[in-house]
Amino acid sequence: MPVLLVDDDFLVRKALRKPLEAWGCRVAEAVNGRDALDQLKLNPRQLVLSDIDMPEMDGLDLLQRMEHEFPASGIIMVTGMSHETLIDEALSRGAIGFIQKPFRIAELKSQVTFALRKLLLTGKNPRTDDLSAPVAAHSAESSARDFARLFVLTSDLHHVETGTHIRRIGRLSKLLADLVGCSAEFSNLIGDAAVLHDIGKLAIPDAILKKPGPLTTEEFDIMKTHPVLGGQILAGAKDPFLKMAHTVALHHHERWDGKGYPNGLAGEDCPLEARIVGIVDVYDALTERRVYKEPWPVERVKSFFAETNKNTFDPDLVGLLLAHYDAFEAERLSECNSEQISWQAGICPQPQSSASA
């Protein structure tokens, strides 16, 4: 997807263009909002990085026009104007990001990466415009699952521990949904959607994500932003699979007593799919070896859920986990099952031997 830089300052456009092209982006430029609209008419599917204060048409007016005339495109505001009200206004009007000048390269890369993924996931696909509704819907669904496949594979390459963890979470979430008595449609959907629960961790620095030891308070605060980041990536999705993935990514760290994050949802105010993923996420973390800890023994894990954290999780889900603990252990230790999560077929890595694990 092309990236369109909109700023009346040549030096700003030059500073933005250099890293974007280094990352493989195709970059075009416009000097104001009207110039940008002319270019969008030629290519209505672009990521726009726009200043706010410009002659002829400012960034907010451009944003408003884009929302109505070019819904397949998206806009990130890049401006030196930092007033909180202005930021809120831009985001409420539909901006998918906001970068403060002078910008940091890491922030630019993070915002652009998220925005491109979001547009690819939720934007209108011109190649399906002329198809019948059922065919177009099937195409969109296939694209969504292709993205999930890519995320799992990328996670394996970036951080093996994360990749194997998210695949297990899909299988464990489906198991728990089945035990709750959810419909087959819901259980299959959560089995697929749960693998995207940690998609926001793609924006967490490796120094934190891969740290071989406990996080500092400051590092943990950064780690705690991943649900919001994941929610931003998946926000606005139309596909039921991605809509559930959005809910799971945003809310899987809420708590039954309302002391979780990011929104402090208590009890059943937190959606069932997020409560399910939340408990199996912790179960898997406790039972698996991590760079900073050894796996917990069975009795310690059971005690954790039964007593130590009785106010953290949905008590009905805790009861099912403990009553069927052997089934969860068997599922956690099982090899990748392409029949349970059909779209994962063919991408699971070769099982490691116990000697290399």
Image: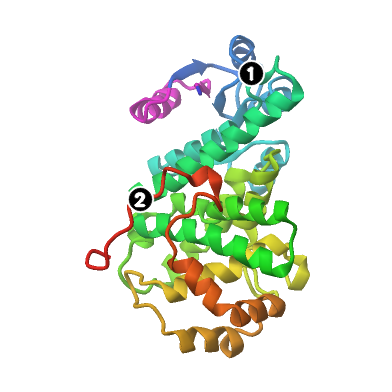
> In the figure, is residue 343 to the left or right of 95?
left
Check the image and name the residue furthest to the left.
Answer: 355
Quadrant position of residue 269: bottom right
Which residue lies at the image location 53% right of the left edge and 67% below the top edge?
A: 281
Instruction: Find disc 1 in the rendering and name its residue.
Output: 126
Residue 7 magenta-highlighted: yes
Which residue lies at the image location 30% right of the left edge and 69% below the top edge?
A: 212
- Residue 68 percent across, percent down from the top left: 76, 23
> Which quadrant is the C terminus positioned in?
bottom left
Q: Nearer the viewer, mark 1 or mark 2?
A: 2
Q: Which residues are magenta?
A: 2-25
> In the figure, is residue 136 to the left or right of 43?
right
What amino acid is found at the position of numbered circle 2 in the picture? Answer: Pro
Instruction: Find disc 2 in the rendering and name its residue.
Output: 349
> In the figure, is residue 49 to the left or right of 276?
left
Between 287 and 47, which is closer to the camera in this rendering?
287
